[in-house]
Image (cartoon, rainbow, N blue to C red):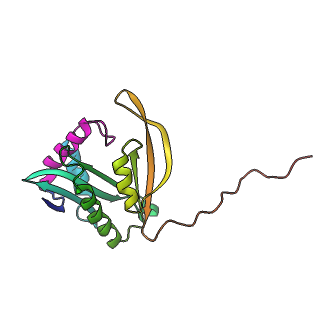
Amino acid sequence: MEIRDLQLDDIAPFCQAIGQVAAEQRYILTTQTPPEDKMADWVKSYIDKPHVHFIAEHKEQLIGWCDIIPLPRQNQSHMANLGMGIVAGYRGQGLGQQLISRALARADAIAIQRIQLEVFSDNVAAIRLYQKHGFQQEGVKRKACFMRQRYLDIIAMARFKDGPPISRPISSPVSSQASG
């Protein structure tokens, strides 16, 4: 098995891998194979910049990926979204661990301060993997997706390069003085 950077020549097999995982309607929000031309445009938009996009191959078949893509707004350029997937038959073998370790090391090297992701609440293996790598739950989006004939909650998680920020109590904008 080889883990390496995504190249433009990988667009077709990358789309196929996404399509395989998407068809399961269990691990990612996407439910169908993305069009290759749109995927190529997306990859071309960041491939020449510092980026994080690793793929895993086994016997010349793309079997997994992990990308950490910075947000486009200038005032959020310190933030990035993490996405990953493993093709059925290759899960539970440590591939996710290898991919995310490589991706986070690269993200830290290019000064991404906050990495965020969303994961289905019933994807316990992924949640544990993310927690193992320093991600903390920030919130839950209740009934955020309808797949497999049921509503699913989505957990928002984030990891900070220098550890989580110090939490401060939120002050209420409503005056606590009683009107008389």
Residue plotted at (37% across, 71% down): 111
> Which quadrant of the structure image shows residue 78?
bottom left
Residue 47, given in percent of the width and then of the height, sits at: 23, 61
Residue 120, given in percent of the width and then of the height, sits at: 39, 43
Q: Is residue 157 above or below residue 106?
A: above
Q: Is residue 106 above or below residue 8?
A: below
Residue plotted at (43% across, 62% down): 159
Q: In this view, does 107 lie above or below 27?
A: below
Residue 34 shows in the view: no
Q: What is the magenta range? A: 9-33
Residue lying farthest to the right in this orientation: 180
Is residue 90 part of the magenta span, yes or no? no
> Which quadrant of the structure image shows residue 98?
bottom left
User: Does 122 sit left or right of 44 as displayed?
Assistant: right
Main secondary structure along the magenta-highlighted residues: helix
> Which quadrant of the structure image shows residue 81?
bottom left
